[in-house]
Image (spheres, rainbow, N blue to C red):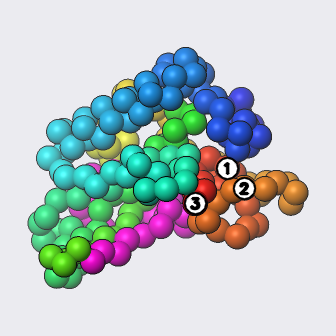
Amino acid sequence: MTHDLDPGRLLRRELAGPEPPWSSGDKDAVEAFIHKAVEAIEAETNTSSRAVFDDYGSGYASYVDAWFYRPTEDFRTGPDQYVGLVVLFSRLTNHFVVGEGAKHWNDSGSASSYLPAIQIVDAIENEAVSTLASTAIRILTGMGVRRLKRDDLNPLLPEDTDVPTILTEGPFRLFDAVFYWED
């Protein structure tokens, strides 16, 4: 296991990446970098995004959930419902994962969405999302962010590991130490 994927460090919210801005320990610089990465993907792919930078309004999220789509037929799955590219950026290490997720909203403000889970990592079925993923991966790796795949994150953590997340009840995997949400 690499130093920057040490579950103990991650669960203590310690920045653990070997490259800047993670190596600097500056959480604001990490947030600015992730904002820049989201903007770079939007600009180069001509997509819109819905990125959650505010810990879902409460608690703490160890990641930023960015969802990219176009309001076109190849992304539409129903009225006001779209499938898009999910990119989870770790706030604690210089890693990201990709997957596919759907969102639905209407004019009254009602909305529904996927939740981050290991099952969505690398699970991409829609051709438009797959093409978008290839470009996003190229952009992010060019920026020095490393992609993790499902196999990288699938190992189980020791049974006594307590992951403060509401996303799953366990058994906990390395994914849960990298991408967790406390509420």
Mark 2 or 1, nearer chain start:
2
User: Is disc 2 in contact with disc 1, using a CB cutoff of under 8 Å?
Assistant: yes
Q: Position of residue 119 (x, y in %)?
A: 55, 67
Q: Which mark is residue 163?
A: 2
> What residue is disc 3 on?
183
> What residue is disc 1 on?
177
Mark 1 or 3, nearer chain start:
1
Using the image, determine if residue 137 lies above or below residue 71. Answer: above
Q: In the rendered structure, which amino acid carries the disc numbered 2?
A: Val
Along the viewing direction, whichever of 14 and 76 lies nearer the viewer: 14
Q: Quadrant of residue 57?
A: bottom left
Helix, strand or loop under label 3: loop
Q: Position of residue 35 (x, y in %)?
A: 33, 36
**Mark 1 crowdedness (10 Å alpha carbons): few <14, some 14-19, many ≥20:** many
Helix, strand or loop under label 1: helix
Disc nearest the viewer among 1 and 3: 3
Magenta-drawn segment: 110-133
- Quarter of the figure with the C terminus: bottom right
Q: Quadrant of residue 3?
A: top right
Point 12% across, 66% down: residue? 72
Q: Position of residue 81 (x, y in %)?
A: 23, 76
Spatial separation of the CA atoms under disc 3 and disc 2: 12 Å
Residue 19 visible within the image: no
Point 50% across, 47% down: residue? 63
Using the image, determine if residue 165 lies above or below residue 142. Answer: below
Point 57% across, 34% down: residue? 93
User: Is disc 3 in contact with disc 2, using a CB cutoff of under 8 Å?
Assistant: no
Residue 115 part of the magenta-drawn span: yes
Q: In the rendered structure, which amino acid carries the disc numbered 3?
A: Asp
Q: In the rendered structure, which amino acid carries the disc numbered 1?
A: Ala
Helix, strand or loop under label 2: loop
